Image (cartoon, rainbow, N blue to C red):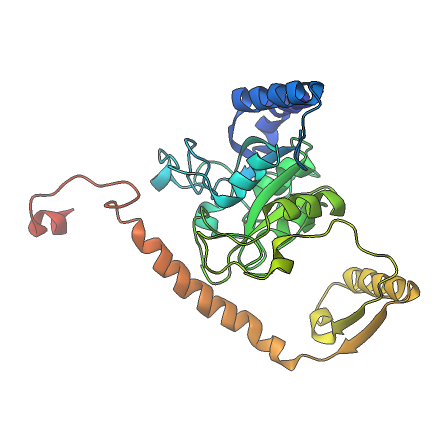
Amino acid sequence: MYAEHISKLLGKIKKEDKQIQAFIEVYSEEAIQKAEELDKKAKKGERLGKLAGKAIAIKNIIAIKGKKLTCASKMLENYTAPYNATVIEKIIAEDGIIIGSTNMDEFACGTDCTKSAFFPTKNPLDTDYVPGGTSGGSAAAVAAEFCDMALGSDTGGSVRCPACFCGITGIKPTYGLVSRYGLVDAAMSMDQIGPLATNVYDTKLLLSAIAGKDDYDQTTHTTAEYGSVDLEYPNEKKLTIAVPKEFLEGADERIVKLFHELSDKLAGQGHVVNEISLPIIKYAIPIFYLTSFAEMSSSMQKYDGLRYGNTNAILENLVEDEVH
């Protein structure tokens, strides 16, 4: 059952990913082996996790023990992760099947997934277009139906934008809901690992599996309510929803129309939708760029060739260094 599903996906990847280039590496043998193990467990009637049989692609900025962790950079082309990120441990615990690692903008710095040091990723909906970045490989893998779900990372839109570009669902969780342990940081005060899938339910399912407190990440929430994500939302519960009018300023007319249609639909279901004003929003982008660039500058210091990254030829003295 599960092995057959994974085999079909691997066949599709082998046939079609040469054009899309969503994956940096595909874990064919491990995925099939895991699927066969789950088939045996299912036949025995043993308990299976909430992600049982789901093929999950992982952005190549999240550590998977024994696998290359390149961040789509030549500097880390041969670097192997020494441990699993917490989200990987949680996926394994819930019987998810990790099918491969996906392409991205180098060191999560880009907007369209054409800034990988290896190759650009194309949008499965139309290969003349980009899939969005920086998690474009993960979004493209989901949209191309190479996997059931995927993980990306989002600092300023790197899950949400490619999800939008590729016509799928993506979430940037509230900071601290998902552990960042094992995520190569871009801007550490804003980075969050987020799920992508073709529909809301599967996106929420993956989020429910990876969310929760982690002793390895002190920024994760400690309250019990943040340790789980309910998959079912009570229909009788009505919400009060604030809509900042500044969010729509400058937006495409078609987007504004759809936005209002959704607001009207929610109001028709009994929810209260109030338009509000958040003037401070005008400072959001300047603050984001100041903060993210400063933090990225800090995070990149470790790629000095001593701790991580390529090491240039060893020079005998500073004079020789100046000549070079």
- Between 293 and 153, the one lying in front of the other is 153
In this view, 9 is above or below 260: above
Coordinates of residue 46 in the picture (x, y in percent) = 67, 25
The residue sitting at 56% across, 35% down in the picture is 92
Drawn side of residue 248 relative to residue 82, left or right: right
Q: Hey, which quadrant is residue 84 in on the image?
A: top left
Q: How many marks?
A: 0
| Residue 8, image x, y percentages | 68, 21
User: Residue 205 location, x and y as percent?
Assistant: 69, 44
Q: In which quarter of the image is the N terminus?
A: top right
Q: Position of residue 24 (x, y in %)?
A: 50, 33
Look at 43% across and 53% down and name the residue there.
Answer: 185
Q: Is residue 213 left or right of residue 147?
A: left
Q: In this view, does 149 lie above or below 321?
A: above
Q: Which residue is rendered at x = 65% and y = 32% of the image?
A: 147
Q: Does any portion of residue 121 appear in the rendered image?
A: no
